[in-house]
């Protein structure tokens, strides 16, 4: 991304594409901006994602079944279900 992430814009996009309700909040904070100038200057790096692609790729991401974190989350889910049904 080459501009600040506007939280209102994120909410609007999630509402339009996924039906999530957006909640307006009164705050002095409206965006997040991380400066990528140094990476551009020293490495010739350029962002490949715009806001919509960033959101879509985050929602479409699926961990591989052999991912250690995935296995841990799955194990905790199974343990929790076993406790619930034995309860």
Image (spheres, rainbow, N blue to C red):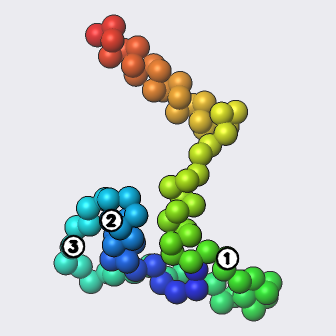
Q: Secondary structure at mark 3?
A: loop
The crowding category of the residue bearing disc 2, from other C-alpha atoms within 10 Å (few below 14, some 14 to 19, many at least 20), is few
Residue 82 quadrant: top left
Q: Does label 1 or label 2 sit earlier along the sequence?
A: 2
Residue at the location (48% across, 84% down)? 4
Task: Residue at the far top: name it.
Answer: 86
Q: Is 2 drawn above or below residue 54 in the view shown?
A: below
Residue pictured at 51% horizontal, 72% vertical:
52
In the drawing, does residue 11 fall left or right of residue 75? Answer: left
Label 1 and label 2: CA atoms lie apart by 24 Å
Query: Which residue bears the numbered disc 3?
Result: 24
- Residue 40 at x, y percent in the picture: 72, 88
| 66, 38: nearer the viewer | 66
The residue lying at 47 percent from left, 21 percent from top is 78
The numbered disc on residue 15 is 2
Question: Whole-percent x and y of residue 41?
Answer: 75, 92
Mark 1, secondary structure of its residue: loop
Name the one closer to the observer, 62 or 25. 62
Q: Which mark is residue 5?
A: none
Q: Residue at x 32, y 81 (%)?
A: 29
Q: Which residue is mark 1?
A: 48
Query: Which of the two discs, 3 and 1, labels the residue nearer the N terminus?
Result: 3
Q: CA distance from mark 3 to mark 2?
A: 12 Å
């Amino acid at each position: 991304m080459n501009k600040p992430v506007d939280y209102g814009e994120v909410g609007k996009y999630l509402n339009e594409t996924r039906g999530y309700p957006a909640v307006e909040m009164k705050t002095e904070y409206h965006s997040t901006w991380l400066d990528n100038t140094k990476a551009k200057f020293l490495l010739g790096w350029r962002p490949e994602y715009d806001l919509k692609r960033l959101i879509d790729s985050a929602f479409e991401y699926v961990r591989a079944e052999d991912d250690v974190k995935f296995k841990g989350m799955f194990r905790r889910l199974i343990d929790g279900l076993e406790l619930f049904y034995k309860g």
